[in-house]
Amino acid sequence: MSEKDFKTDALKRVEQELKKCVKCGACRAHCPAFAAFGKEPAVARGKVALCQHLLKGDIELDDATYAAMSKCLLCGSCVEKCPNDVPTDEIVMVAREALARQRGLTTFHAAVGRVIRNRSLMKFGAAAARVLGPLFFRKVPETSGLRLRFPLPFVGGKRHIPPLAKTPFLERHPEVIPGEPGKPRIVFFVGCMTNFCYPQVGEATLALFRHLGCTVIIPKNQQCCGLPGMSGGDLETVRGLAEKNLAELERYEADYIMTACATCGGALHKFYPNLVGKRHPDLAARLQAIAAKTVDAAQLLQKLGLNPEETGAGGDVRITYHDPCHLRTRSITRQPRELLAGTPGVELTEMEGADRCCGLGGTFNVYHYDTSMQINAAKSDAIIRTGATAVVTGCPGCMMQLSDGLKQRGSAVKVVHTVEVLARKLRR
Amino acid sequence: MLEQRILAELKNIVGSDNVATDRQDLICYGYDATQMEFLPDAVVHPGSADEVARVLKLSNREKFPVFPRGAGSGFTGGALPKGGGIVLVVTRLNRILRIDTENLVAEVEPGVVTEQFQIAVEKLGLFYPPDPASLKFSTLGGNVAENAGGPRCVKYGVTRDFVMGLEVVLPTGETIRTGGETYKGVVGYDLTRLLCGSEGTLGVITKIIFKLLPLPEAKKTMLTVFDSIDGAAKAVSTIIGGKIIPTTLEFMDYATLQCVEKRFNLGIPASGRAVLLIEVDGDRDLIEKQADRIQELIAPLGLVECKVAKDAAESEALWKVRRLVSPSLRDVNPDKFNEDIVVPRSKVPDVIRVIEKIQQKYDIPIVNFGHAGDGNIHVNVMIDKSVPGQEEKAHEAIAEVFQAALDLNGTMSGEHGVGLAKQPYIHLELKPEQVAAMQAIKKALDPNNILNPGKMFPLG
Ligand SMILES: Cc1cc2nc3c(=O)[nH]c(=O)nc-3n(C[C@H](O)[C@H](O)[C@H](O)COP(=O)(O)OP(=O)(O)OC[C@H]3O[C@@H](n4cnc5c(N)ncnc54)[C@H](O)[C@@H]3O)c2cc1C
Ligand code: SF4
Ligand code: SF4
């Protein structure tokens, strides 16, 4: 296919969406990439304008286009506040797909693709270390201990990274953990970060749903959700993963598909249904069905009537809550707060800008690590100012980014997942 | 196209990271909220007033046009580089220099975002009232250059009423100060007021001294629904005649209500033909009394419903009705021309009636809402540009709307300015002698026609 075809082929899919933007500039108030870079190509409006011109054919998929499109955290903040419902996050992903197809994937994203493609989560960790390790070793200083323990594709550079779990979560449990008859059957979509870095989040989630008598199913062959690939424009890989996950998630009859990772939830709920066009109506319908069943752990716990007085304990902790973008843009902001506020011993203090992105942004932080940490610095300061001893959030990706920022500030504030606070009494 | 040697000089002045010539950058500084597009030859981001001055001196020597730009949220194309030249983006000048709590003044750079400034002064118990709907993203420099207004202007006045002094780089590159920090001052011409609303044609604003007020203790919001547009208009004059000046008197006509109801189902009574959103502010006791008094005053005027907010959350819920107007308009038609005529406030029903006739004549939907307290009405002509002939019809309808406002002793534009968009119509409002006087000022200050040429008046 010629370059023109790449552009138009991909961007045609969002042609109507592109027309909706009236260039009002409202996104300037909400886009974290714009706040960091300060120039118009970084803001949603600029990216939309560039895509309009790409479609018209008067600019190319060249370095300047690439630079502009790389400056997006896919956080959806602009979409949430846009008076005209322009889905800039999706538009950027489509543009990145066109860029990836035209220019070939960048070394880094190609490596991400190799790792996340065609591999079950079980084998993923080892593969990640093997394929991506050398790439990052070039960026990490000789003296850094990080050279020895690079865990995941979307982690690299100078950052503090969580250590890999000795036994990944998925290896610890049978596939089906039966609950009480008549109680909901839940498929647990675990996600890479929980599996490899934060297995305690998986354990707490499992404990809570078992406490409620639910049957929890943890399909063994689930894959990476693919968002890191999506972020880089490698939509082919993501489609492949989506199909594999689809087959895996459809294997069991379930009332809900639940995840404790906001990012995975966003992928299943929001991004998967848009992956396939009109050419594959059957596939689209199946992805839509999965999306309709996908819920966040906190959202479902509240719906099923969890009483945090029975399960959770803070031990007099003062906490503050960070809204992960991929929960906030699905309007899941109230549920975790209400559950946390109802937990004995917990005092919830709101930070300034709880709804602001932490700066991770898919693979954004790999290309723009310093900017990503600049965005994160404001977050760390806001957390520290509350005087909280722990910051609680609903996304392992945010957990990593928040820990990194706080550690670099020399702060002792702990980073924990909502389910960990809620399940504290259930610990063995 | 600018010659390489000129680009090199520009880079020398502002640093090479702050001069962009990639087509992508040109595209991103070629639009504003009018949705017109003109690409510049280069985009320049100065970091100080001195750099601004040096850029303007260079542009005079080399004779290339300079287009000042803030956030690019303008509704009339004021910042667009029609004909080419450089876009001079002032958003790097974004410091709040000082807030003087003793003299109630503040000094800021032009790139500060309006709301950021409001938040900063409110933290100190002070108040900067001008509140254009774009305040979350527009810049203070852009607000001064367009003399922006908003709902609170009925009581407090527009941006100009808060500008005490300016630092301005003249089109020829000299830097001057106008006005000052004192409430009084009569030495020389009032250049401050001349520059407010000058749309970036007479100078680049590099510092602004604002007057501040003490922050009112509380506010009270009410949403009132009337069975006729006349009832709502009468309510406005009755409230003000009753010696209460509300902070806000926002009005929505029937067409607007229908749009909002259809999309968001807010439960506004079906017999409602017009809505007034009323807000008073001040001491807690006083505003309770004022709110009661307002209800008494408007009860006989065909009031269908009156909701009074008890707290901030309820107030926000009432404001939502107003805020949802813009997003719901798209359902009527995809494209809109958003005009902002002003008439004396008692003439609001008259002008709405004329607009209804215009709407019937041209058979295109026109939706009206806005600031009833000062007679400033946003007239939204809703069309579908992809339908052949609609855009032409819209322009004819708009000319008639302007004429209607002028016939009622009003003006074509209360907030958005002339820029490029309203140029074809200015002869309706301004006599040739008036235009000549204005052009003489422009010519005296900008002999080479360097700064924002072709705005307000046609080129040449
Ligand atoms: C959704 C929306 C709502 C709006 N609501 C309102 C409203 O309620 N009331 C209202 O009045 N307007 C409103 N506007 C219009 C617009 O926001 C205002 O005109 C605002 O003041 C423009 O500020 P800006 O920073 O975006 O300026 P720009 O659009 O960048 O520029 C506007 C003009 O100012 C000049 N300029 C900018 N900075 C300087 C400077 N430092 N020195 C000299 N000239 C300069 C430019 O050359 C141009 O002519 C709205 C716009 C939008 C998109
Ligand atoms: S993306 Fe939305 S908010 Fe941003 S300029 Fe376009 S319409 Fe306005
Ligand atoms: S998704 Fe986030 S980073 Fe990307 S344009 Fe929108 S607000 Fe900016």
Image (cartoon, coloured by chain):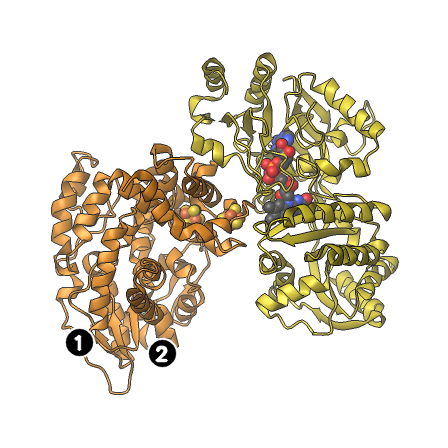
Chain colours: A orange, B yellow
Query: For disc 1, does the CB lie below 8 Å from ligand 3?
Result: no
Residue A313 visible to an observer of this rendering: no
Q: Mark 1 points at which residue?
A: A176
Q: Which percent across, then down, holds residue B259?
A: 63, 64
Q: Give me the C-alpha separation between circle 2 and circle 1.
A: 20 Å
Q: Which of A223 and A312 is in front in this view?
A: A223
Decide which of tag 2 and tag 1 comes sooner along the chain.
Answer: 1
Residue B173 visible to an observer of this rendering: yes
- Specify whether A117 is left or right of B9: left
Above/below status of B257 relative to B351: below
Q: Which of B385 and B151 is in front in this view?
A: B385
In this view, the residue farthest toward the bottom is A181
Residue at screen point 87% across, 60% down: B242
The image quadrant of residue B420 is: top right
- Specify whether A325 is left or right of A231: right
Q: Name the residue under label 2.
A: A304
| Amino acid type indicated by mark 2 | Leu
Q: On residue A45, which mark appears? A: none
